Image (cartoon, rainbow, N blue to C red):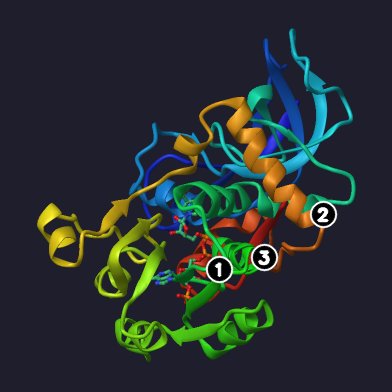
């Protein structure tokens, strides 16, 4: 069986992405062949492409998709031909019309969740789940500072935090994005580049600062995040959209008030099948009762993956982006 896939032979800008026809073999033991129906675009895909996160080359790309089981290999017990499935982790290769997957990475899509929603909510939704229920157990008493609140992951985190009852100070890059996060209940909206973030955060928290900052922007927002935390606050540095955050020294954490610092990844919060299923069910439960809605503002053909990358890296997308196989 042949498929169309995005592959790259060298790291670099979006132009390194090539559309190829490649063959997908029969599934081996424990493997499932999935025909993709929608593919989720994630910022991490740009780090793999650029070389910020090195991968062996040549390589496929993409970690998130939804689809249908077309064939199962020997010993597969969880899935059968025709099942609707989705994934948000595992081997790179979601940017394709089909792929072979270990059944351990796949999750069944509940009835009522459409293909695009499933493709947009696996990696991003499970990230929101572990960041807000495990990295810190968010409560209604918390106020959080959330950068890139209008992004694919940020918009889900915002909704999740509001569902918990927490107060959210969201940072966005444009007035248009401010309107989007306001529609999702963001309590206080700061504009990146216009507002002095630590000053505004302190004004909103009686001078104290917030107990937790969720920073996926990295280099550009690092100082502002550090200076927005209350004593014993938690700095959650979970991405590098503007470039990697600088190194953190223990002396700085001490000087800023006995701060905690973590650099979490989904992989380390979904190490077992039980952990993966726990995160996915927390996401789907919230989708089912309407607490989480996925906003897909950008759709591209699979072949236009390079254009989709340019758009995502320009910082001007809103909500989630989907590639259509
Ligand atoms: N550690 C994990 O487990 C994990 C999992 C998923 C995602 N992430 C991280 O979370 C972040 C968000 O991922 P996403 O896929 O949902 O992307 P996204 O938030 O939809 O897009 C990135 C956003 O970052 C903001 N940004 C600020 N400075 C930027 C710059 N110099 N260049 C580009 N964007 C800039 C922009 O929003 P504004 O204009 O509104 O600021 C932009 O829309 C990424 O850093 C990603 O690596 C981490």
Please give the residue where the numbered disc 2 appears in the rendered image.
288
Mark 1: few/some/many CA within 10 Å (<14, 14-19, 20+)? many
Please give the residue where the numbered disc 1 appears in the rendered image.
151
For the residue pair 40 and 79, the one nearer the viewer reads as: 79
Q: Residue at x 80, y 41 (%)?
A: 109
Left or right of residue 56: residue 182: right
Could you tell me if residue 96 is visible in this image? Answer: no
What separation in Å lies between label 3 and label 2 (alpha carbons)?
13 Å
Mark 2: few/some/many CA within 10 Å (<14, 14-19, 20+)? some
- Residue 261 occupies quadrant: bottom left
What separation in Å lies between label 3 and label 1 (alpha carbons)?
18 Å
Pinpoint residue 211: horizontal percent, then vertical percent. Answer: 38, 66
In the rendered image of this protein, does residue 11 appear above or below residue 305?
Answer: above
Q: Earlier in the sequence, mark 1 or mark 2?
A: 1
The numbered disc on residue 43 is: none
In the rendered image of this protein, does residue 133 appear above or below residue 217?
Answer: above
For the residue pair 76 and 25, the one nearer the viewer reads as: 76
Dots 3 and 2: beta carbons under 8 Å? no
Q: Residue at x 53, y 35 (%)?
A: 270
Q: Residue at x 65, y 27 (%)?
A: 101
In front: label 1 or label 2: 2
Q: Is mark 1 within 8 Å of ligand 1?
A: yes
Disc 3, SS: helix
Q: Earlier in the sequence, mark 3 or mark 2?
A: 3
- Residue 36 occupies quadrant: top right
Q: Earlier in the sequence, mark 3 or mark 1?
A: 1
Please give the residue where the numbered disc 3 appears in the rendered image.
163
Pinpoint residue 232: horizontal percent, then vertical percent. Answer: 28, 61
Pinpoint residue 15: horizontal percent, then vertical percent. Answer: 46, 57
Could you tell me if residue 222 is visible in this image? Answer: yes
Task: Please state the total of marks drawn on the protein image.
Answer: 3
């Amino acid at each position: 069986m042949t498929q169309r896939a995005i592959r790259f032979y060298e790291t670099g800008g979006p132009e390194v992405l090539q559309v190829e026809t490649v063959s997908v073999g029969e599934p081996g033991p424990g493997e499932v062949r999935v025909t993709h129906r929608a593919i989720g675009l994630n910022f991490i895909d740009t780090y793999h492409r650029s070389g910020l996160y090195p991968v062996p080359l040549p390589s496929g790309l993409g970690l998130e998709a939804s689809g249908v089981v077309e064939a199962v290999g020997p010993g597969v017990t969880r899935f059968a031909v025709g099942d609707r499935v989705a994934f948000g982790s595992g081997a790179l290769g979601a940017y394709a019309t089909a792929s072979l997957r270990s059944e351990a990475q796949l999750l069944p899509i509940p009835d009522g969740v459409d293909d695009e929603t499933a493709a947009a909510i696996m990696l991003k939704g499970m990230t929101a789940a572990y960041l807000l229920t495990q990295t810190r157990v968010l409560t209604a008493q918390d106020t959080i500072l959330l950068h890139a609140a209008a992004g694919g992951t940020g918009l889900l985190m915002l909704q999740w935090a509001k569902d918990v009852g927490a107060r959210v100070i969201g940072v966005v890059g444009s007035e248009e994005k401010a309107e989007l996060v306001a529609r999702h209940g963001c309590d206080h909206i700061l504009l990146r580049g216009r507002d002095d973030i630590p000053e505004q955060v302190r004004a909103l928290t009686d001078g104290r600062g917030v107990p937790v900052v969720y920073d996926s922007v990295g280099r550009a927002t690092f100082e502002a995040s550090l200076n927005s935390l209350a004593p014993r606050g938690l700095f959650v540095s979970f991405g590098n959209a503007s470039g990697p955050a600088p190194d953190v020294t223990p002396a700085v954490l001490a000087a800023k008030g006995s701060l905690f610092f973590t650099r979490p990844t989904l992989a380390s919060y979904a190490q077992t099948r039980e952990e993966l299923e726990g995160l996915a069910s927390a996401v789907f439960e919230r989708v089912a009762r309407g607490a989480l809605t996925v906003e897909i503002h950008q759709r591209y053909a699979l072949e236009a993956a390079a254009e989709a990358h340019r758009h995502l890296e320009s910082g001007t997308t809103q909500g989630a982006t989907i590639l259509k196989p």
